[in-house]
Amino acid sequence: MGAGRLYVAVAAGGFRRYATYRAATVAGVFTNTAFGLILVYTYTALWDERPHLGGYDLAQAVTYVWIGQALFKTLANGGGGVETELMERIRTGDVAVDLYRPADLQSWWLATDLGRAGFELLGRGVVPFVFGALFFDMALPADVITWLAFLVSVALAMLVSFAIRYLVALTAFWLMDGTGVIQMAWLLGWFCSGMLLPLNVFPGALGEVVRALPWSSLLQAPADVFLGRADPLGTYAFQAVWAVVLLAAGRVVQAAATRRVVVQGG
């Protein structure tokens, strides 16, 4: 089997694996929908006081909320990606099996995570978004090109998200317990991706800084493409640069870890 076919098979396996957790998927759909409702009414109150906050009208702000709920689990902003499993395999020493596979460690876990993300987008993300479109006034694109441009941006966001979480997971080669690192990564992911508030709302230098960080590739970038507030090609370039930089950093850290490994418990 060629390398490409191997990783496609790994991604498909990741998709099938997460598709088996049907009860968890239904519970996740309910949770995302409920949390989306809370945010919508919070945003409505905020935008009533400050119309066009961050350059969005209320319909765009509501749309932003439901995009966030569709992508929340897809991009594993609050956990649930492959990083937790990888950290546990490093801690127990099972990662040695991964290193003996005739496949690159980073590429293997990337393919697995893309399969997971694909399922989360279809299985958990679509229903809350459709619910929002049915019951709220949303700013939906009228042309197919914008929808396709949005999906390309989402795919790049998946790469950036994995690259960040892979770096987090690799800290387990040196740390006895990676819980603190994961929690810090979740907090940064929530705040700096725009999951709580659009990054356009952040004032002055703070806004410029958070919009330049890689986390802005996760939600703010796809949302602005969807809402027609960003040039797709410029957005893709921004996301792609961060994906390349972070994946390269992951490869450097991986090489350092496998040269000088102290596997906890192994």
Image (cartoon, rainbow, N blue to C red):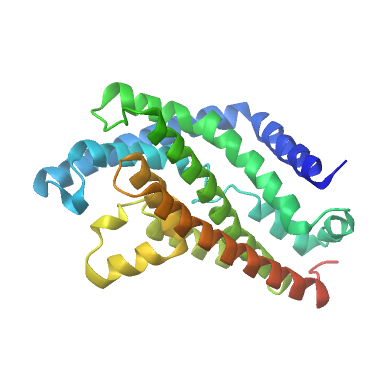
Seen in the image, is 94 located left or right of residue 12?
right
| Count of residue discs | 0
Q: Nearer the viewer, residue 107 or 177?
A: 107
Residue 178 in view, yes or no: no
Image height check: is 245 above or below 9?
below
Q: Spot the residue most to the bottom.
A: 260
Q: Residue 117: image x %, image y %?
A: 59, 41
Please state, as top left, top right, bottom left or bottom right, where the C terminus lies in the image.
bottom right
Residue located 37% across and 44% down the image: 225
- Position of residue 135 relative to residue 164, above or below, is above
Asked if one can make out residue 54 in the rendered structure from this viewpoint, the answer is yes
Q: Position of residue 151 (x, y in %)?
A: 48, 38
Seen in the picture, residue 176 relative to 142 is either above or below; the reply is: below
Name the residue located 50 percent from the left edge and 50 percent from the top edge.
157
**x and y percentages locating residue 30 in the rendered image:** 44, 30
In the visual, does 92 lie left or right of 125? right
Return the residue found at the far top: 134
The answer to whether residue 171 is left or right of residue 78 is right
Q: Quadrant of the N terminus?
A: top right
> Where residue 240 sits: x, y (%)?
52, 57
35 versus 252 height, above or below? above
Q: Nearer the viewer, residue 143 or 91?
A: 143
